[in-house]
Amino acid sequence: MSRQKQQRGLTLISWLLVIAIAVFFGLVGIKSIPVYLNHYKVLSIMKNVASQPGVAEETTAEIRKSFERRFDIDMVKHLSHNDVKVVGQPGGDRSLVVEYEVRVHMFYNVDAVYVFKEEVPLRAQ
């Protein structure tokens, strides 16, 4: 009696499934990159504003104005002026807080939601 050789490897249907999964994660990755690059711009701006000399003594309106001016220069998307807050701490220290969410359309009726919240202390210099 002769034994049949066992098949090794993926079938056509298995390859199509692997490719479909790879395309899905590739699409999510490609659509996520601009959102995270934008967020890193926001974080960089927050750190720059918080480290300015005398920023701890400025009013909330002045800090917001400086923040929004940098947003315009760096062309930051997905943020409104309501997302930027200056929060006071119990010890008298203040922090710059940004909290926002971004919705990105993926395909059909599927969206990805990214939620960001960052807090940077204002330094008195």
Image (cartoon, rainbow, N blue to C red):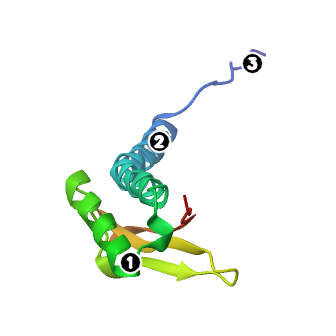
Task: Using the image, tell me which numbered label, if any, was put on residue 83.
Answer: 1
State which mark lies toward you, 2 or 3: 2
Mark positioned earlier in the residue sequence (3 or 1): 3
Per the image, label 1 sits on a secondary structure element best described as helix
Looking at the picture, tell me which residue is in the foreground, 99 or 73. Answer: 73
Looking at the picture, tell me which residue is in the foreground, 1 or 60. Answer: 60
Separation (CA) of disc 3 from disc 1: 70 Å
* Residue ID for mark 3: 3
Task: Using the image, tell me which numbered label, if any, was put on residue 13.
Answer: 2
Mark positioned earlier in the residue sequence (1 or 2): 2
Whole-percent x, y for residue 84 in the image: 40, 75
- The amino acid pointed to by label 3 is Arg
State which mark lies toward you, 1 or 2: 1
Q: Are marks 2 and 3 in contact (CB under 8 Å)?
A: no
Q: Is residue 116 visible?
A: no
- The amino acid pointed to by label 2 is Ile
Mark positioned earlier in the residue sequence (2 or 3): 3
